[in-house]
Amino acid sequence: MNWYKRIKLAQITKRELTYLDIGHNEDWEKPNYIWVFDKGKLKIKKVDADIPGHLEAFPDISYNIYSGRYEGDTGILSFMKPLYGVNAQRDIPSFLINRLYEAFPNITEIKIF
């Protein structure tokens, strides 16, 4: 991580990170990824100009799923629970956390939203 990103991250962490602070930049050179867990499968795509968000990357997914983003240069992973239903109230399944660590072995922090 370069000095500018470290300073920027230090400024951001002085306040609580929001979902939009993680992996939502337009610097397509940075290794940012979006992920969803839909129908029992973890699906991952690299963010770029053609795939800026979940709907572009996964047009066939349902809306009530686990999803998030991963910043490869900071190792921060965002995690969104389903918006409604039983899974919105449950703890995050440990098998899903394990699959995310397998997919992104350099996770430094998980932020749950």
Image: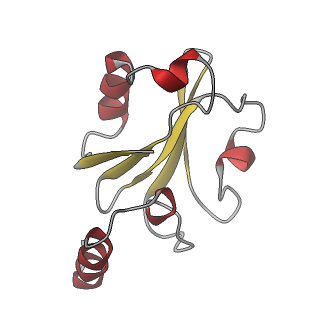
Given residues 72 and 11, the one toward you in this image is 11
Q: Residue at x 53, y 19 (%)?
A: 87
Picture layout, residue 57 above or below residue 64:
below
Number of disc labels: 0
Instruction: State the image quarter where residue 96 is shown.
Output: top left
Q: In this figure, which colouring scheme has been used for the structure?
A: secondary structure
Quadrant assignment for the N terminus = bottom left
Q: Position of residue 102 (x, y in %)?
A: 31, 30
Given residues 83 and 48, the one toward you in this image is 83
Picture layout, residue 48 above or below residue 99:
below
Quadrant assignment for the C terminus = top left
Query: Is residue 108 shown left or right of residue 54?
Result: left
Instruction: State the image quarter where residue 40 is shown.
Output: top right
Q: Residue at x 70, y 38 (%)?
A: 58
Q: Position of residue 43 (x, y in %)?
A: 55, 31
- Residue lying at the far right in this picture: please name it: 60
Picture layout, residue 36 above or below residue 95:
below
Q: Position of residue 85 (x, y in %)?
A: 62, 20
Query: Is residue 50 shown left or right of residue 66?
Result: right
Q: Position of residue 98 (x, y in %)?
A: 30, 24
Instruction: State the image quarter where residue 97 is shown.
Output: top left
Picture layout, residue 105 above or below residue 82:
below
Query: Is residue 30 shown left or right of residue 14?
Result: right
Q: Residue at x 35, y 56 (%)?
A: 72
Q: Residue at x 27, y 69 (%)?
A: 13
